[in-house]
Each structure stands twice: as C-alpha cells, then as structure tokens.
Amino acid sequence: MNLKSATLQKIDEVIPHYPADQKRSATLPLLHLIQEDVGYIPAEAIEWVAAKLGIQPINVYEVVTFYPMFRQKPIGRRHVKVCRTLSCALMGGYKTCAEFEKQFNTHAGPAEVSPDGEVTVEFVECLASCGTAPVVLIDDELHEKVDCAKAKQLSDQIKAEAKKR
Amino acid sequence: MPAPAQRRIIFQHIDEPGYTNDLACYVKHGGYEILKKSVARPPAEIMDEVKKSGLRGRGGAGFPCGFKWSLVDRKSGKPIYLVVNADESEPGTFKDRYIIHQDPHQLIEGIMITCFANNVKQAYIYIRGEFPHGARILEQAIAEARAAHFCGPNVLGTAYGCEIYVHRGAGAYICGEETGLIESLEGKRPYPRIKPPYFPAVLGLYQCPTIVNNVETLCHVKYIADVGGDAYAKIGTPNNTGTRLLCVSGHVQKPGYYEYEVGKITLGELLYEVCGGPLPGRKFKAVIPGGSSAKILKFGESFTLKNKDGSMRTLTVEDIPMDFDTLAACGTMGGSGGVIVMDDSTDMVAALANINAFYAHESCGQCTPCREGSLWMKKISTRMVHDTARAEDGALLKSVADQIAGRTICAFGEACSWPTQSFIAKFGDEFKAYPEAKKAVKPAGALDLV
C-alpha cells in the first residue's frame, strides 16, 4: 500500500480515538483517508486496513460495499453530485442533473465518468440543503439554487480548468 | 392576524453579519459561561433541570430528553458514552447544517454540559459524510475548545475530563437510526439492532450505556442549563416546550429555516405569512410537515379533535399548530421539522415515486419486508409514471406498504410505508385516474420528479 506520509500520520492519529480493544471503529475513518489520498478504495487497501486494525478483510469489504460514498473504482478529476430527492426535484433537480450529463456526455444512473475521464456526474440522495434547492455538491463545495443556467456555468468552469492543465 | 414573531434561541447568531465560527467570537458573545456555571453544580441538578424543562428530542421521535437520560444504566460500572446524532438525513431537514457550520461551539458547549451532567467521559459526533466542511469545522472547534480547557482533560481546572471526537458517516440514511448509527460507529454495516435488548441506554456503543441525542436537542440543553427547566417549560405550549427549528422547502415563495416557540405558529401562518405563500399563479395542494417519512396533509381536509374538557374542535390543515401532539392527533408528525410543500402543479404519483426511490435506495436490507417492500413500492410507482399505469396500482401499493409497517427491526419500516399509505389515503382518486390522466399532454415546464 503506497500512501502519502501525511495520510499515514492521520491514520495513526485517528486510531486512538477509539478504545484500544475497539480498533474496528476506525474502519470508516481509515477508508475516508485512503479514498481522499488514492481517489478510491483499491482491493489492496481492504487487506491493508484489515491488517492495520486486526480484523478480517471481509469486515472491511462489507463496509466498503455498503456505504454509497465508498467506491472501488477511480472517478473523474471532479465529482459532481446532484441531489435527486423530493425538495430538489420539486424545484427542478432532474433538469439540473440532465444539464450536467449533457455538458459532460454522461448518462443518468450511478456514478459515471465522462468519456475524457475528467468528470463524474452522480445523482445522489438528499444533501440536506432543501431550502436552497436544487443543490449540487462539487467535490467538497456545495452550490445552491443550481438551475440549468447555473449548471452550465459551473460546467464551463470545470471545462476551463481542464484546458488550463 | 399577523404570524407571531420568531423566537431565535438556537439560531440567535445564525446569519448574523460579522459572527464567525471560531472560539474568540463565541466567547465574545458570552460563550462557555454556561459551562463554567454548570461544572460548579451537582450533575444531578442539571439532569433535573432538563427533566423539568419538558424538552423533547428534535431528531424525529420527540422522545423526552430528561426521561431518555434517566433510563441510562448507571450501575453497570461500564463507561457511559454520548453519541451526537449529526447525521441529518431526513429529506426536507436542513437545520443542524447551520448550527454545525456557523455556530459549532454552541453545540460543543451543549455536549460538554450534557456529558458533565451524565458523567460521560467520551463523546462522539457522528456527522453525515456529505458535510465534509462541517466535519472539519467541528474538528477545528474541538481543538480550539480543548486548548482553552472547555473540553479534554481537567475541564476548566476541575477533575472532570471528557474528550470529543468527530466520526464521519459515508452516505447512508439508516445511520440516523440510533442503533444503526452505533453499529456504524463500531465500524460495521449500520444494521439496526433489535430492541429489546439493545436499548442504547443499557447496551449501546461497545455494549455500554449510551445516550444518543440530536444536534439541536443538545443546543437546547445548553439553554436550559442557563435559564432553568421551569423557565424553559414556559416557552412554547404544555408538553411541547421550547422553540423548534422549522425548515421549509418546495413550492413556497420564501423557503428557509425559522425558529418558533413550539405550537405558537400554525402551519397556515408559517406557509402563507412567513414563507410568502404559494408561487405566483399557484395554489397549495399538499404538505409533508415533518420530513419525508411523515404522513402527507392535503389542503382542504379537516380534522376533528377532542379538547381536554371533552368538547370537540375542527381544524383545517392551515389551523394546525406546529407542535408534536396536534400533528400526531392529525395522523402525521412533527418529526424532524422538515416541511415540504407541494402546489397544484405537482403530480402526486410522481412525487410518491420520488420518495419511494429514496427509501428503496436507503433500506439497509436487513429485514425482508422492508428490503423487498420498499423496492416494490419504488418499482410500481415508477412504472406508473414511466410505463403502464393501472387503476388498481394504488391499492397494490397500499397492500405492500401495509405489510411492512410493524414488521421490521427499526422504524425505517414505518418511515418507508407512511408516505405510500398517506398518499393513497388522501390522493387515491389521483392514483385511480392516473392511467387516463397521463394520456393528456404535459403542461409546459412540468418537471420530472422521478
């Protein structure tokens, strides 16, 4: 497992947050840290976390496969999560999602990466900002009242970043 | 009559210009003074104040907070844990987000007072994964508070110490269910535990006595420790004390968050006066008053309720006071305070299909009636919208829902069946007429909901 030293340091800091005989509790925090570092949870990470916490790989695997935020495949450079749930849908969330999909040439459904590998568009469940619907989370940044025009504007920004690189 | 004024206790500083989420700003506004006062008191006295206050949990169930604390097993010799439920996931609810992002020290002070009162030495804040900034803000705030001896070892120079750690979820709604949350905190799939025997107060985190409280609830505890239980109980209405954060979303002019004394504002005042009424040219059709699992109310229906003196009163939807008990008497619930409004442009079959898709996605899969039932409710309602609809589909949906509620380990079974049961009960005609109605050309600008 090839993790950044900063990640390894954070991992060693987080394990003692839990009682010494309850290291398994650190499973979610460790997976978050690895996903932030690597971009996804590779198969070897499952073995690595299990060894680190003294549990079986299946204990880690069942966690990775349950929680929607953990992924076993790489995604695009930017991750666009459009809220699908009722309050956002009532204010046009489906149109917003369709606009992002059109902009990046992806298709509705579970997280799919654009053909150029740049952007992943995902239609997710409630992001808990229903008063400013429709909302979109781009990586860690929340964007509020994202209608089609704003979706296009955000997409253009992402495309401009790609060109600069 | 104009709507009553907001009473901002918990949201006193939310959106206040110049108010920042760091320790210095919080202390400048009198922060941690109540903790200072509290650690000089006998813990039992604080517990007593909370009991007297009548505070009811703000996470959804409205369970009396002081009573919850009194159930904690204090004789086992095991450590007692506090787990803060910051998993805010009920669709329509977005109140804790603002406390966490804008006023995190208010929450930390509430946590520390609660921990001191209950002799808790270790607290975990379980925050939903979709609040990455919120988690960082809380970690930063805890570090600041620890450096200033407001938490950590020897709180304010006393012998009492308590650590607080932030634990991030990873996108699963079921982690808001307290025993599912505990399983998740233990590093497992969040399969809720069966009660009995696994009441958190006795067998919670690591099989130790555990208190699970919502973010907003803990902020109220801080206020109660300041003004006292009797004074707090005078706010709001009997058995529905204090203030409550109401989150309004959907088809209104001014969606947003508002804080009112419990039961002092009616649903009609909230929607017409505070939120500015329906969008131009529209009329209100339906409202879900307490998060998406609460049963829907239909504008135009009325409720005949019994008064304390035995006489009867009739309430329209607009007349219902936003408290726990009246909403329950009207067959729904105050839940998490998430009010979702739908106007006359809304296709109720599609709206139900949207909700059903949520619950089908979020069922943990442990209990067969819920795992299978939530999926079938999604499939049937989605088929009605996108494929063939049959006049008897409403009855079919209801029969599925009726076989889930009451047959599952946790309350998710009810949460996923109540929408279907109430939509069919109130809008059954629309479901029956759907095969014909959907042949009509959709009005321009009609939105997809599923």
Image (cartoon, rainbow, N blue to C red):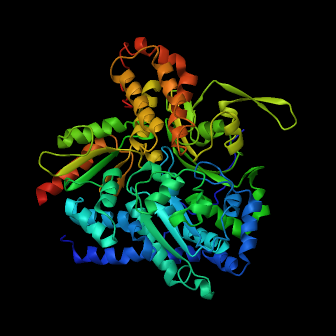
Question: In the picture, residue B332 is in which quadrant?
Answer: top right
B402 or B23: which is nearer to us? B402
Q: How many marks?
A: 0
Q: Residue at x 36, y 54 (%)?
A: A142
Image coords of residue A160 (percent x, y): 16, 54
Q: In what quadrant of the picture does the C terminus of chain B appear?
A: top left
Image coords of residue B394 (percent x, y): 49, 20
Q: Is residue B287 above or below residue A140?
A: above
Q: Is residue A152 left or right of residue B383?
A: left
Image coords of residue B366 (percent x, y): 44, 45
Q: Is residue B443 above or below residue A161?
A: above
Q: Can you see residue B284?
A: no
Q: Is residue B38 above or below residue B171?
A: below
Image coords of residue A28 (percent x, y): 36, 63
B221 or B25: which is nearer to us? B221
Q: Is residue B422 above or below residue B247?
A: above
Q: Is residue B39 left or right of residue A149?
A: right
Q: Residue at x 46, y 49 (%)?
A: B174
Q: Can you see residue B245?
A: yes
Furthest-right residue in this view? B309
B115 or A145: which is nearer to us? B115
Q: Residue at x 43, y 65 (%)?
A: B167
Question: In the picture, residue B158 is in which quadrant?
Answer: bottom right
Q: In what quadrant of the picture does the N terminus of chain B appear?
A: top right
